[in-house]
């Protein structure tokens, strides 16, 4: 018995070694696919992640690659459209990528994941927050470096009812996948907790030229606070119009708004806005390193999900360095060992949610997001 | 061949474009840090590019003019357009069709899964294009909301599959029927509108359908969409990803052939001729005793049927639907297929769909410049071939004495 | 009642925003029968030019008033130049082509221009400086009408009056109306139709640029995609009022703006666009040529 067990393990080791060797000889480089919106109206959410992956790859290659093997980034555009995303995914699969960073939008990610799942490729999204992706159990190959919508909704609701102690809340969303999903969680949590009343639940049309009608409606509802589900462009317009109409209603928003662009665009009207987001990491040397690199090459501040993109790239390359390119081995490392990332030491739970990314509420003070205690 | 005047004009045009692109291309501002970067090198690129392009286009036009002059004076005979010749004489088009079919059949064995996958997309657009061709190309009704019927089909499959577990084959005809039903529902009140009014109403209808899918969460699961839609089954055999993509490919090919067959027969039928007549002159058409309303309505409903079926195939292929796939831009692309390919011409629409859908995929090499090039190609194509790649061959009868 | 007035004014603001863009659509349509899908992009380019010029001028320390005037001037000049160039390049060669070809050309132009700005500038949202100052005298009414809303209303009104004057009483205006009625006939009486069409595009584009400037400084942010949505809405408004008719475009815009505001206020903003488009369908069913459009009787 003992003998056979030993035999088995030796055999297994040989098989593994052979597998790795054949993988290594088949691909002279480690290929990382990056899929997301690189053109179209949502390009600004996809491009920073692509740049993040490129910078991480460049950084690794300057140090000689992963275990001596160079890293290659294959970026593919999916315009955040599900039907294009399946083409993108098939293309990446047929190019034999080892892992994929992406996709950016939850819808596109959902459409693309079955293809990666069947090809046994690990996918890590920097920005797809839909709870189904991890909770449904349909996508065991999926990981993300961002908090899911329900977790964020919980944070915002608890903050509004326990810390700010508001009684009447208006829930506004942008009718999008992310915004509406989050807003629905906020509404159901508020109703379940019973600590505050939902006085208004409305969707606004993204890109509309004026939001004063909905702002008047918020005023009429008598809400003490607005919880907004959506991204910063609309949040900025709504907050500005509220302040222009001299409303002092508090404004709470998720990480889609916790972006420096929001403060830059909204200016002084942004003061006092609360936004949840990953814990402040600007002092982390890794964060600084990659942000500076981005500044040096692009001459501008990195945009949305840049840190999440860097985190995904580092977590994946770290796992590949430790486990080779076999998906099961990478998955094991992702679950068990932490990687040093801009968000600190990060690993993943069995559903693919990140562990180690702290989540806090910020408030805009003097043109900066400041952590609220 | 080019005179001094041409060069002087070229210089003027160059100056104009340098002026035109000056603020957007040369100045790059950072409004937050209040800093400016002047990118003078871009100005140089614009200047050189414009000048070269201008000279080339002059040369082309000069040659074209010369050619026309020769035709006029009888030196060279006016050539029948190659495309018209190709599709009017059986000895040309039968070998082409056979070769095309053979190539299509062998495609999955020759190319990678990715290629097959984008080919499926392109072929679905062939079906959509042929469907819209009935409405726009044949019957002359400008429909900017065609994507609504596509959405109806896609959601029909997604919802029926989710709630009742209905399979692809059951829903395919249901999707078509639902498409037709919506076509009639919309067509009934709006078909008395003319030309561009019809266009904007159909655009509005397309947006309304999308917005309802987006907002009525209890019905359609809203913007987060419906995932895990079953792929089409093949007698219950468990297919791997690659095999199911190949299967889907052959299914789409069958669908395309079926569509071509039906559309072709329709065009030669009584109702098809009524459509052509309607497109050419409504009043004369009525005078000939054609029921205008009924004819338009059938065109609308039949066009919508194909969109409905294509929608079912779309849902089966992507296994996921959400309202973001059914925006106005999609309608615009399908319309581009019809017009760019050649209105009313079946081979034209096929070529148009293949070009317009495969082009952005192959333009991925240009990465960032992909959509820029795509837009420019649309404009340039229209300028040089306004009648489309393959224009329709008008049915002509020649009397022999 | 207060609520009603508040909604009414927010509808008016929206309406005048749509009107500034819709006028360009309706003028072009009236004269060559083309739905100029690239018009929304002209509006976006106007706004971007304004952003660039105002930032540069502010950096070089010009006083606020000079910045406003020069910015407006630059936005108008460049937007008009783009309008003119687009017409020359993408539409004029197609004058005698099948009816739908210029439409596809316009869609292509729209995609091209969006991506041109995306590549030349940035994909991010950019903050737009508040060029319209906050008026002190408006402070008591700030909760109903903001200073920028007022500025938009006033400027739109002035622009529309000037435009009506131009169309009604100047030689160019007459030539425009003649070309719109019958292009061949206009040519026969000695009107340079090509020039008239160019002037139409230039005027329409200039209006769009003014719109872009006002709206961007009202909203406070722009990106390369703003033209598309605003364009579709403005076009809807133009059709609603009867496309080709200038008072119709204004009326249609206000009706559309007010409908959206009241729908949001009294029903739900979830379905704001559904209301807008349903209204369009309803009106066209009963008045197939729009509210102020003339129903043409086709003669054989």
Image (cartoon, grey):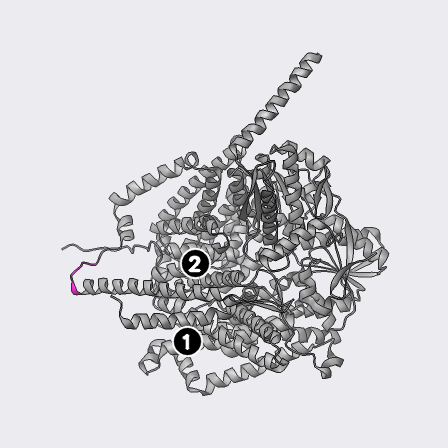
In three-dimensional space, the C-alpha distance between marks 1 and 2, rounded to whole angstroms, equals 37 Å
Magenta-span inclusion, residue C112: no
Quarter of the rendering occupied by the N terminus of chain C: bottom right
Let me know if marks 1 and 2 both belong to one chain.
no
Above or below, A99 against A52 in this view is: above
- Determine which residue is flagged by label 1: C198
- State which chain disc 2 sits on: B
Quarter of the rendering occupied by the C terminus of chain C: bottom left
Report the front residue among A47 and C185. A47
Report the front residue among B291 and C191. C191
* Chief secondary structure of the magenta portion: loop
Q: Residue B31: x, y in percent?
A: 62, 68
Residue at 50% across / 66% down in the picture? Answer: B25
Q: Secondary structure at mark 2?
A: helix
Apparent side of residue A54 relative to residue A282 in the rendered image (left or right) = left
Tell me if residue B204 can be seen: yes
Q: Residue furthest bottom?
A: C169
- Determine which residue is flagged by label 2: B296
Residue span colored magenta: B73-78
Q: Residue B305: x, y in percent?
A: 48, 49
Find residue B17 and report its image quarter. Answer: bottom left
């Amino acid at each position: 018995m003992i003998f056979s067990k030993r035999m088995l393990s030796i055999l297994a080791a040989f098989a593994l070694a052979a597998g790795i060797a054949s993988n290594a000889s088949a691909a002279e480089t480690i290929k990382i696919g990056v899929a997301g919106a690189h053109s179209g109206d949502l390009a600004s959410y996809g491009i920073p992640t692509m740049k993040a992956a490129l910078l991480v790859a460049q950084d690794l290659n300057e140090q000689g690659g992963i275990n001596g093997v160079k890293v290659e980034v294959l970026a593919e555009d999916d315009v955040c459209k599900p039907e294009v995303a399946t083409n993108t995914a098939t293309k990446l699969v047929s190019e034999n990528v080892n892992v994929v960073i992406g996709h950016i939008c939850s819808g596109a990610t959902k459409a693309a994941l079955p293809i990666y799942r069947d090809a046994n490729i690990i996918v890590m999204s920097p920005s797809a927050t839909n709870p189904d992706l991890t909770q449904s159990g349909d996508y065991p190959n999926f990981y993300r470096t961002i908090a899911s919508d329900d977790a964020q909704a919980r944070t915002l609701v608890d903050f509004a009812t326990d810390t700010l102690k508001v009684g009447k809340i208006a829930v506004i969303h942008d009718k999008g996948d992310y915004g509406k999903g989050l807003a629905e969680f906020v509404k159901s949590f508020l109703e379940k907790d019973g600590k505050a009343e939902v006085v208004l639940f409305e969707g606004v049309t993204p890109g509309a030229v004026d939001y004063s009608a909905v702002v008047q409606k918020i005023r009429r509802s008598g809400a003490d606070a607005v919880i907004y589900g959506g991204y910063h462009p609309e949040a900025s317009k709504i907050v500005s119009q509220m302040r222009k109409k001299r409303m002092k209603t508090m404004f709470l928003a998720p990480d889609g708004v916790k972006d420096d662009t929001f403060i830059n665009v909204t200016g002084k009207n942004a003061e006092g806005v609360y936004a949840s987001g990953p814990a402040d990491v600007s002092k982390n040397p890794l964060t600084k390193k990659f942000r500076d690199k981005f500044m040096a090459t692009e001459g501008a501040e990195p945009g949305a999900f840049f840190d999440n993109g860097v985190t995904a790239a580092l977590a994946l390359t770290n796992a590949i360095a430790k486990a080779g390119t076999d998906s099961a081995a990478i998955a094991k490392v992702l679950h068990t060992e932490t990687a040093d990332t801009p968000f600190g030491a990060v690993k993943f739970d069995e559903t693919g949610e990140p562990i180690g990314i702290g989540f806090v509420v910020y408030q805009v003070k003097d043109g900066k997001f400041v952590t609220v205690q | 061949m080019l005179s001094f005047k041409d060069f002087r004009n070229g210089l003027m045009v160059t100056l104009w474009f340098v002026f035109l692109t000056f603020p957007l291309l040369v100045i790059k501002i950072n409004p937050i840090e209040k800093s400016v970067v002047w990118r003078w090198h871009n100005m140089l690129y614009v200047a050189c590019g414009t000048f070269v392009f201008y000279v080339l286009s002059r040369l082309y036009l000069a040659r074209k003019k010369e050619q026309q002059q020769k035709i006029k004076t009888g030196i060279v005979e006016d050539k029948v357009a190659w495309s018209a010749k190709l599709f009017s004489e059986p000895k040309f088009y039968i070998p082409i069709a056979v070769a095309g079919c053979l190539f299509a059949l062998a495609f999955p064995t020759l190319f990678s899964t990715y290629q097959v996958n984008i080919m499926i997309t392109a072929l679905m657009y062939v079906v959509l294009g042929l469907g819209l061709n009935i409405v726009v190309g044949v019957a002359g009704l400008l429909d900017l909301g065609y994507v609504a019927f596509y959405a109806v089909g896609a959601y029909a499959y997604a919802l029926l599959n989710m709630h009742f577990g209905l399979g692809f084959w059951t829903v395919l005809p249901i999707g078509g029927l639902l498409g037709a039903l919506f076509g009639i529902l919309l067509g009934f009140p709006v078909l008395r509108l003319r030309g561009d009014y019809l266009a904007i109403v159909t655009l509005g209808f397309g947006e309304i359908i999308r917005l309802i899918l987006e907002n009525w969460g209890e019905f359609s699961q809203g913007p987060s969409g419906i995932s895990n839609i079953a792929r089409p089954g093949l007698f219950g055999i468990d297919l791997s990803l690659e095999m199911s993509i190949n299967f889907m490919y052959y299914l789409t090919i069958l669908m395309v052939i079926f569509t071509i067959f039906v559309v072709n027969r329709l065009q030669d039928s009584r109702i098809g001729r009524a459509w052509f007549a309607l497109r050419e002159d409504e009043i004369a058409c009525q005078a000939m005793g054609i029921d205008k309303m009924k004819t338009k309505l059938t065109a609308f409903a039949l066009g919508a049927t194909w969109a409905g079926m294509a929608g079912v195939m779309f849902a089966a292929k992507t296994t996921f639907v959400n309202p973001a796939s059914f925006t106005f831009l999609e309608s615009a692309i399908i319309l581009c297929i019809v017009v760019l390919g050649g209105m009313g011409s079946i081979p034209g629409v096929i070529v148009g769909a293949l070009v317009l859908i495969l082009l952005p995929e192959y333009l991925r090499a240009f990465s960032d410049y992909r959509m820029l090039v795509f837009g420019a190609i649309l404009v340039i194509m229209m300028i040089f071939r306004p009648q489309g790649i393959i224009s329709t061959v008008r049915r002509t009868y020649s009397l022999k004495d | 009642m207060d609520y009603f007035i508040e909604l009414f004014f927010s509808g008016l603001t929206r309406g005048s925003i749509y009107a500034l863009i819709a006028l360009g659509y309706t003028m072009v349509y009236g004269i060559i029968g083309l739905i100029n899908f690239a018009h929304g992009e002209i509006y976006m380019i106007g706004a971007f030019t304004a952003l660039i010029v105002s930032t540069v001028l502010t950096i070089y320390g010009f006083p606020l008033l000079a910045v406003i005037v020069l910015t407006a001037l630059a936005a108008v000049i460049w937007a008009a130049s783009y309008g003119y160039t687009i017409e020359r390049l993408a539409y004029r060669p197609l004058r005698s082509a099948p009816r739908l070809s210029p439409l596809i050309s316009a869609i292509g132009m729209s995609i091209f221009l969006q991506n041109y700005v995306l590549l030349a500038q940035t994909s991010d949202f950019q903050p737009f400086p508040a060029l319209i100052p906050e008026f002190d005298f408006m402070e008591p009414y700030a909760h109903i009408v903001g200073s920028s809303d007022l500025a938009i209303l006033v400027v739109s009104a002035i622009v529309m009056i000037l435009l009506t004057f131009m169309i009604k009483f100047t030689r160019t205006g007459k030539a425009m109306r003649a070309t719109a009625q019958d292009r061949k006939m206009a040519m026969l009486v000695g009107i340079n139709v090509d020039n008239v069409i160019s002037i139409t595009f230039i005027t329409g584009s200039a209006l769009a640029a003014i719109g872009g400037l006002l709206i961007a400084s009202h909203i406070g942010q722009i990106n390369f995609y703003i033209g598309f949505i605003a364009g579709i809405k403005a076009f809807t408004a133009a059709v609603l009022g009867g496309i080709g008719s200038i008072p119709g475009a204004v009326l249609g815009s206000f009706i559309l703006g007010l409908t959206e505001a009241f729908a949001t206020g009294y029903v739900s903003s979830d379905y704001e666009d559904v209301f807008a488009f349903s209204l369009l369908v309803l009106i066209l069913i009963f008045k197939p040529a729009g509210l102020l459009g003339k129903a043409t009787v086709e003669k054989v």
